[in-house]
Image (cartoon, rainbow, N blue to C red):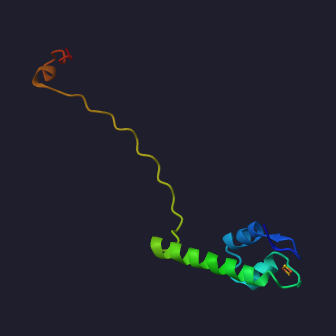
Amino acid sequence: MYVCVCNAVTEDDVHSCMAKGACTTAKQVKAACGMLPGCGSCTKRIHAMVSEYRTASELADALTGGPLPFTAVPDPAPAAVPAPILTQDTERGAAPPTAA
Ligand code: FES
């Protein structure tokens, strides 16, 4: 859906700009989207979108303790090889017990 009809800027354009972290104010969104001065009827909507995004982002950071730093993914642990079951008989060279 169009947010700014005069400049043909959509909601996706605005969300994309904010998601990249480059735009945290309506003024920055307008500049990043290449919006030229027009009728101005979109300004209130862009302010609301920026405010919603910042509120959601701050809430997510508060709940999760903030953005997590990038960490290397550890190598998977090698598969454990089960140790043979030894009994007194098998230790003396007898055949291990078999299941019936
Ligand atoms: S709708 Fe954005 S300037 Fe007119």
For the point 88% across and 82% down, the residue is 36
Task: Say if residue 90 shows up in the picture.
Answer: yes
Residue 99: percent from the left, percent from the top? 21, 17
Residue 43 figure quarter: bottom right
Quick one: 77 or 46, which is closer to the camera? 46
Quarter placement of the C terminus: top left
Residue 32: percent from the left, percent from the top? 79, 77
For the point 67% across and 70% down, the residue is 19
Residue 6: percent from the left, percent from the top? 89, 77
Q: Is residue 28 above or below residue 11?
A: below
Task: Say if residue 65 shows up in the picture.
Answer: no
For the point 86% across and 74% down, the residue is 5
Q: Is residue 84 above or below residue 39?
A: above
Q: Is residue 72 above or below residue 86?
A: below
Residue 54 figure quarter: bottom right
Q: Is residue 86 left or right of residue 15?
A: left
Residue 81 figure quarter: top left
For the point 86% across and 71% down, the residue is 8
Q: Is residue 50 left or right of residue 4?
A: left
Q: Is residue 31 left or right of residue 77?
A: right
Quick one: 41 or 56, which is closer to the camera? 41
Residue 57: percent from the left, percent from the top? 57, 74
> Quadrant location of ligand 1?
bottom right
Quick one: 46 or 79, which is closer to the camera? 46
